Amino acid sequence: MPSLQIDWDKYNTLTERLALNVHESGFKFNQIICIARGGLRVGDVLSRIFEHPLAILSTHSYSSDGGTIRGELVIAEHMTMTKPRLGERVLLVDDMVDSGHTLAAVHDELPKRFPHITALKTAVLWWKACSVFKPDFHVQYLADNPWIHQPFELYDALRPEDLKARLDP
């Protein structure tokens, strides 16, 4: 399987490019929802750039073999947000659309849970060809479906007891 190594500079540039793509599209939204965990960093940056509130929706599906085998998708019952009511024009953000099942399920579920939503578009950094869902906005289309190694993945294996050796070589 091909792989793609992403460092922090590249990750930040891709996030900024995504913000520019959304801006240049003219899509007017008043709420950003990020899918946790992958969309947290992207959602945070877009929320700062656009000055719109960020809501966080947790999902979970990657359950075994180092996150490569998809389990049953669970969408959290509640969203974390700072406003008493979710905005009606929503930009739904994640880092990538891989299989597409998570983004598709959340995209379908949000208007059911929040019938006042009048517009809902999706934005990701990477859109893989194997996806069953096409995002409204993306930065890179990946025809060869690589495994993406993101800069924060080093924390997946780092434990508190390992920090001293890492920080005090």
Image (cartoon, rainbow, N blue to C red):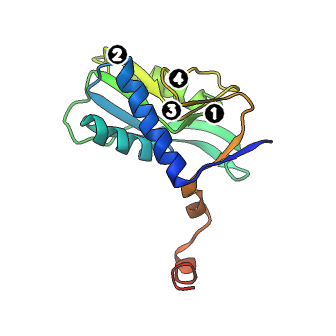
Element assignment for label 1? loop
Q: Mark 4 points at which residue?
A: 135
Of callouts 3 and 1, the N-terminal one? 1
Q: Mark 3 points at which residue?
A: 124
Secondary structure, mark 4, is loop
Residue wearing tag 2:
119
Q: How far apart are marks 2 and 4 (CA)?
A: 14 Å
Horizontally, residue 65 falls left or right of residue 11, namely: right
Of the 4 image quadrants, the one containing the N terminus is top right
Three-letter residue code for mark 1 = Asp
Crowd class of label 3 (few under 14; some 14 to 19; many from 20; radius 10 Å): many
Residue for point 34% across, 18% down: 27
Cα gap from disc 4 to disc 1, whole angstroms? 11 Å
**Residues tagged 3 and 4 counted as in contact (Cβ below 8 A):** yes
Residue 113 in view, yes or no: no
- Pinpoint residue 57: horizontal percent, then vertical percent: 41, 39
Q: How crowded is mark 1: few (under 14 residues within 10 Å), some or many (20 or more)?
A: many
Taking the spot 56% from the left edge, 36% from the top edge, the residue there is: 96
Task: Kindly state the secondary structure of the residue where label 2 is placed.
Answer: strand
Give the residue pinned by disc 1. Answer: 98
The amino acid sitting under disc 4 is: Pro
Circle nearer the N terminus (3, 4) = 3
User: 34 above or below 132?
Assistant: below
Mark in front: 2 vs 3 = 3
Q: Earlier in the sequence, mark 2 or mark 1?
A: 1
Dividing the picture into quarters, in which one does residue 161 lie? bottom right
For the residues labelled 3 and 1, the Cα–Cα distance comes to: 10 Å
